[in-house]
Image (cartoon, helix red, strand yellow):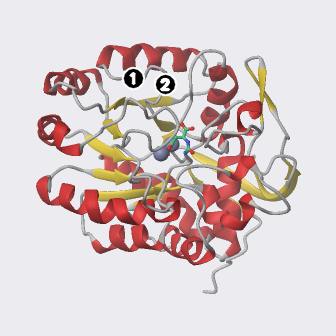
Amino acid sequence: MIQNTHPASYTLTRPDDWHIHLRDGTALATVVPHTAAQFARAIVMPNLRPPVTTASEAMSYKARIKAAVPAGMSFEPLMTLYLTDNMSPDEILRAKDAGVVALKLYPAGATTNSDAGVTDIRKTYKTLEAMQRAGLLLLVHGEVTSPEIDLFDREAVFIDQQLIPLRKDFPELKIVMEHITTREASLYVASETSHLGATITAQHLLYNRNAIFTGGVRPHYYCLPVLKRETHRLALMDAATSGNPRFFLGTDSAPHAAHLKEHAVGCAGCYTAHAAMELYAAAFDSVGKMDKLEGFASFFGADFYGLPRNTDTITLKRETWTTPESFPFGDALLKPLAGGETLAWQMI
Ligand code: NCD
Ligand code: ZN
Ligand code: ZN
């Protein structure tokens, strides 16, 4: 049978987003409905100000998120804690009991709201031991922060200096390298056989670093880790569409008020939640691999986390539409990635 690699519509098991920033307060009213419209569950990042560092804070944050889910939609936020140098192993037990699924490692200063992050991974070893015993996952923002390391090399250096030794010391700890951006990361994850997974964003599949500089500085294409050169984008496309179950969907949708991105020191983060599946569909369709989207978006993340797969479906239709240029965001505006552009796929 000849497979139709350019279908007019595509129905798949409802996907999950394994990396999202929902923020807090009035922002929730804008961003939660976008994510809940597409995804059944999402791994909610804890980098609020101040960060979510206790099980009880995670539970009240979860209640605020659930209160922002529109009537008639069902959406399950999966909560995480922000790992710090001095988090007590007892908090891991409370987190496990409360249903928290993972801890997030931000090297101090690596990205948005990471000043409270880990200064030296060895300081967290007692906590990591407790996580390994309790079966909580470790999610990592995999970039070194040393100013002498070139910004574009920080992910590859993190793998060599931090991740390889960490995996040796904690072979039973499940680790997700979040938002991978390089050929090195995709090869490293593929070279391991278990306990190591990676999320990939839509923007790192669709764009290379030229997008940030086309005709001038374009702050809405700036996120961390920053977009890389074309060879890396191609390697990420290979990984995402390979059917290897250790690569799965994580949008890293990261809303910031537009005036804070269009700024002398603009914030890092791309907002994609309003059209997440449409953007991933564009990427997979560009290489004739729509048939690989369901595993990546709907199966592999749940399998890696040891959670059941979803049973309902969504449908994407090949029908052009123009995405909104902005959304209200509290008192400010939120400008999404590719705002005002035409997309070829639409979720119906
Ligand atoms: C994220 C944010 O804004 O919270 N920004 C980003 O550029 N990806 C933080 C992160 O995931 O590193
Ligand atoms: Zn990050
Ligand atoms: Zn993120």
Looking at the image, residue 197 sits to the left or right of residue 17; the answer is left
Looking at the image, residue 250 sits to the left or right of residue 84; the answer is right
Q: Residue at x 60, y 39 (%)?
A: 254
Q: Is residue 59 above or below residue 310?
A: above
Q: For the image shown, how many numbered marks are present on the structure?
A: 2
Residue occupying the far bottom of the picture: 1
Percent position of residue 32, x then y: 62, 28
Residue under label 2, please give it.
48
Answer few, some or many: residues within 10 Å of disc 1's Cα (few below 14, many 20 plus, some between 14 and 19): many
Residue under label 1, please give it.
52
Residue type marked 2:
Leu
Percent position of residue 299, x then y: 44, 55
Q: Please state which of residues 287 and 137 is positioned toward the viewer in this rendering.
A: 137
Give residue 344's quadrant in the image: bottom right
Percent position of residue 229, x then y: 61, 72
Residue type marked 1:
Val
Q: Is residue 189 above or below residue 147?
A: below
Residues at marks 2 and 1, CA–CA distance in whole angstroms = 6 Å
Percent position of residue 10, x then y: 67, 60
Looking at the image, residue 262 sits to the left or right of residue 29; the answer is right
Q: Residue at x 29, y 44 (%)?
A: 138
Give residue 35's quadrant in the image: top right
